[in-house]
Amino acid sequence: MIDFCILLEAYFDCRRHKRKTVGATEFEMNYMSNLVQLLDEINSRQYKIGKSICFVVKYPRYREVFAGQFRDRIIHHYIALRLEPLFESQFSDRTYNCRKGKGQLASIRQLQQDIREVSENYTKDAYVMGIDLKGFFMSISKPLLAKMVDDFIVENYHGDDKEDLRWLCNMVVMHHPERDCEKKSADYLWEFLPKEKSLFTNGEDRGVAIGNLFAQLFANFLLSKLDWKIDYYCKHHVRYVDDMVLVARRKEALLRLMPMIRETLASLGLRLNEKKFYFQHYSKGVRFVGAIIKRDRIYSVNNTVNNYRKSVRKLNEAAKAGNIETINKAIQSVNSYLGIFSHYNEYGMKRKIIKEELSKESWQYFTVKGHFQSIHLRKKFNIDIKYKNMANEILNRKIEERKEVPSESEISRMLDSGYELEIYATSNGRIRIEGFPPS
């Protein structure tokens, strides 16, 4: 049986960074009773997965996403807390997605280092082979994955809740969210998805829902078999989800791996995407997870650069309108791209686009920090609205008895100009407001 403390740990892990969502708020309002009810349902084998919401995202490409109810996501976190440490002990060090201490940038740096090592610091020839899987998440066989996970638990997990874990894992893997869901996107958006890219049309018992925690965790587990086989023949390889790159000194060493890779994938019910295969000398550059890796340089792909330009244009439009809140949101969007580019050799591009797209009038609202590392709203515009409201409220309440207090318009002008207000209590019980100019 599952202990309450275990489920409570999963709940706290699940609500992290999610407390502002509607589902998390509703659950938290009476979370102790809700957790007790969920625990009782699991231990009595009455638990059933609830209705999911389904929508289509357009960027960077059309993709179908399912999101479970908050109570169901607690179960996903319970599974992850139990299995992730065991998976980590068996994962290849060359797998970089959804792992602590890894990530997209780390995978790019690793591939750059591999190219440097194989080419002996760019003094010898080296070849790069990139492969991708066709419809990875939607091609996964549910029965095959459920059996692999169950066999792993039987062999490696020894907790008192072993049988509960097996039951829940089988339930979440074999679940068909498309049979009981609420669509949040217009129906016509599904027409942009190929049949093999949707759980509604990709075939019976195939595909896992993108958007659930267990999908990423179990996908890594599924491909770990391929990771180790590649590692046996080629030490220099990197995988991020279903995007893999191998590096070797000789062409033949890489090409000989293709039959083994195809055979291993076929045993998992998967296959390569023929349209996303490339094989070339490292000096021509390697495209990998949103970056172009060249000798001693890393650039961003054109799609990201174009989106950055659009973000800067939106900032310019917001500055022309003069709406501080809109300007602040636009600045956050621009800074997100500047943060990405700070890890690449993109200083010239960052500076050029900002200089080209921002008008002279818009510069009155913000400043650039460092070597175009970030943009910040100027101090005189960055006033917390609650303090402005507080000052106005004090003024309205005391205006009749404190004729010496500046008028409401004067206080607003001081706040807009960056003045700091200080409130004093006088000996006769009244209050006095003084404004100090910005330093």
Image (spheres, helix red, strand yellow):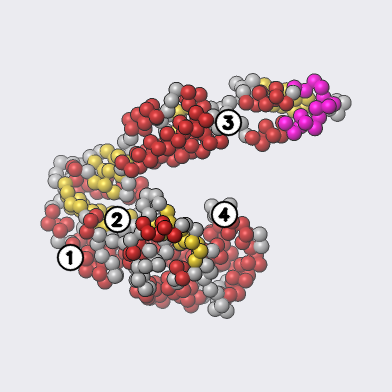
State the CA–CA distance, disc 4 to disc 1.
47 Å
| Mark 3 residue crowding within 10 angstroms, few (<14) / some (14–19) / many (20+) | some
Residue at figure coordinates x 62%, y 71% from the top left: 37
Q: Mark 4 vs mark 1: which is more N-terminal? A: 4
Let me know if residue 212 is in the magenta part.
no
Which type of secondary structure does the marked residue at label 1 adopt? helix
Q: Is residue 322 visible?
A: yes
Residue 279 appears at what percent x and percent y? 18, 52
Q: Which range is magenta?
A: 392-406
Question: In this figure, which residue is indicated by the disc labeled 2?
Answer: 243
With 118 as the anchor, is 392 left or right in this view? Answer: right
Q: Residue furthest bottom?
A: 44
Which type of secondary structure does the marked residue at label 2 adopt? strand
Let me know if residue 398 is in the magenta part.
yes
| Mark 4 residue crowding within 10 angstroms, few (<14) / some (14–19) / many (20+) | few
Q: Mark 3 vs mark 2: which is more N-terminal? A: 2
Q: Mark 2 vs mark 1: which is more N-terminal? A: 2
Amino acid beneath label 2: Asp
Q: Mark 1 or mark 3: which is in front? A: 3
Amino acid beneath label 1: Pro
The disc placed on residue 21 is 4
Q: Mark 4 vs mark 2: which is more N-terminal? A: 4
Residue 235 appears at what percent x and percent y? 23, 56
Question: In this figure, which residue is indicated by the disc labeled 3?
Answer: 382
Q: Mark 4 or mark 2: which is in front? A: 4
Asked if marks 2 and 1 touch (Cβ < 8 Å), the reply is: no
Question: In this figure, which residue is indicated by the disc labeled 1?
Answer: 259
Residue at figure coordinates x 33%, y 32% from the top left: 349
Residue at figure coordinates x 27%, y 38% from the top left: 297
Which type of secondary structure does the marked residue at label 4 adopt? loop
Q: Mark 1 vs mark 3: which is more N-terminal? A: 1
The disc placed on residue 60 is none
